[in-house]
Every structure is written in C-alpha cells, then in structure tokens.
Image: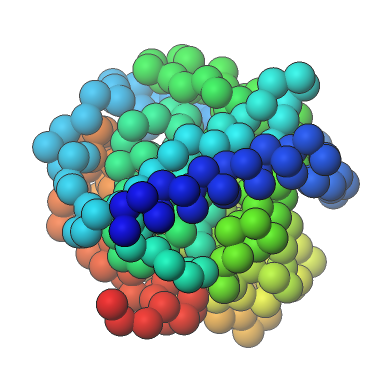
Amino acid sequence: MVIHQISLLERFSLLALLAVMLGACGQLGSDDAEGAKAAGMATADAMSEEHANDSTAPSEAATTAPSRAVSSQEMPYTEVGDELVYGYFSAPADMFEPLPAVIMIHEWWGLNDNIRAMADRLAAEGYIVFAVDLYAGNTASTPSEARALMVEVIEDPEPANQNIRAAYEFLTQNAGATHVGSLGWCFGGHWSLNTALLFPDDLDASVIYYGQVTDDEDALRTLNMPVLGLFAAEDRGIKVDTVEAFRDALERLRKNHDIHIYPGVGHAFANPTGNNYNAAAAEDAWRRTLEFLKLHLSISDS
C-alpha cells in the first residue's frame, strides 16, 4: 500500500516537472495595480508591527501529528526566472483515487516547516494538499526578512499569479482533483482571496485567515464560490472595519459567505509560533475550516 502511494507521488512529481517544461501557466493582467500596491504596503507595515517580537520556532501546538498516515513530497510545479519552484504535496497514504484538493498558501514567513505540518494535518482529513511557495524557495526567520519577501510580491504580483495558476493546473490536470479550494493565513489569507479572484468560476471554496481583503464590488462580483473568513477583533493590521466592509459587500452581492470575527484575540491567533496564539480561537477556527471544506469540496466521511 505504501509502495503504491510513493509511486503515485513520484508520478505526480514527473507530471508537474513536465508541465513546467511545457510552460503550462498563463499570464494574468492586473487592474488598479497602484491601489493594490498601496494597500499591500500598508498591510506589510502593519504586519511588521504585529510580528515584531515573533519567531518561527515551533511550539508544542505546532507539532500536532496528523490524524492518520500521510505521504508527502517536495515537487516542482512552476519556474521563476531560470529556477524551478518547489511546493509541498501531501496526501493520505492510502489514496487510491482522485480526491478534493486544497491550495495552501503560507504566511509572510514563507513555506516553512510549520506550513508543511499544517499541510500534513489537512491531508490526513482526506485531501490532496499542495502548499505553494510564493517566495521562490526563500523563507524568513525574522520580521524584517519576512517583510522584505512580502514586499517583493506586492511590488510585482504577476509571478505569484502565475505561481497560483500553475498549482491549480497541476491539481486539476495532473493530480485529477475532483474539487479545489484555497486556504491561507495572513499574507496567504490575502492570496487565498486572490486565488478566488483568479478562478472565480472554477474554485470551489476559499478560506481566508486574517488576510487583507477588499470591499471592491466590481472585483468581488465575479466570485461564484463560498468564502469562509476568520478574523480577529483586536487585529491592528487587518482592521475590523475593513473586514466588516468586506462582509457587507459580499452580502450586497448575495455571495455565499461566512465571516467570523473572534473577540479578544489579535492577528495570527492561529499561528502556534506567534505571541498572539490563542488555542481556543485556533481550535474553533480549524473546526470551522474542516466543516466548511467538507461541505463545499464534497468530501465523504472516511
């Protein structure tokens, strides 16, 4: 059984590499780029304050084991310049047929061991999880490093757009995913929404953990998937009024959404390596996430 799964992962890896060689991802134009950059820079500055004393050292809560065996592998799926970009692919060890998939997007720290651990936890619930790397192989260990990496993406978002497109194409065309959702925290929460905007008719669900959002109805009007938003009342970077404006816009547009704001907690309350980690809120948010994905990605009980 294990040998079968390893060969399956190797096959996916070869298919992903072939897709990169053939230039599988496309281009995406940007609208209102200057406004988006300004908002992104303001968020980067706010994140620097929120994470000023944080580190990426894992705590006990960050080492929660998956509920069942998973198989995982680093594999290439796109290219930046002349360099291959590797994502983290994780799936149940006993996977024999296509499953729902989730594009997982890292926090501003990058694709580190904490995100890989979360990918394994989610994969154990019965999903193919592809944790993408929007930093082209770089990770941060200090807030200043994280801000620099985040700013690079803000100033030139097109490689990140191509990155997400490549991941989606890999999951749907090579991994045979039955449905695809997106999930991200902080910087990745913003990019989970961006993923929804990139695939407004194709993505099946989007989960946003305290990421930068918008109330631009022209942009949000295109969305045709349910959205779960998990935010913090005491977040100084992703302020409650912007979250409420986002929710109000979704309501006016009659979009399927569930926006939950946790009282008394701050930004990154679900990050077990941060100073704002709140176990009760994090556990409730994870429960909501699993219920939401199960409902909208049509996963059956295992």
- Residue at 55% x, 81% y is 256
Is residue 237 visible in the rendered image? The answer is no
Q: Is residue 172 above or below residue 257?
A: above
Image coords of residue 149 (percent x, y): 57, 22
- Residue at 24% x, 24% y is 57
Q: Is residue 297 above or below residue 183?
A: below
The image quarter containing residue 217 is bottom right
The image quarter containing residue 215 is bottom right
Tell me: 224 left or right of 142: right
User: Which corner quadrant holds the N terminus?
Assistant: bottom left
Residue toward you, 17 or 112: 17
Residue toward you, 290 or 276: 290
Tell me: 166 left or right of 180: right
- Residue at 51% x, 69% y is 98
Image coords of residue 19 (percent x, y): 74, 44
User: Which corner quadrant holds the C terminus?
Assistant: bottom left
Image coords of residue 171 (percent x, y): 61, 57
Colour theme: rainbow
Is residue 139 visible in the rendered image? The answer is yes
Tell me: 269 left or right of 278: right
Tell me: 142 left or right of 54: right
Image coords of residue 113 (percent x, y): 33, 32
- Residue at 28% x, 48% y is 270
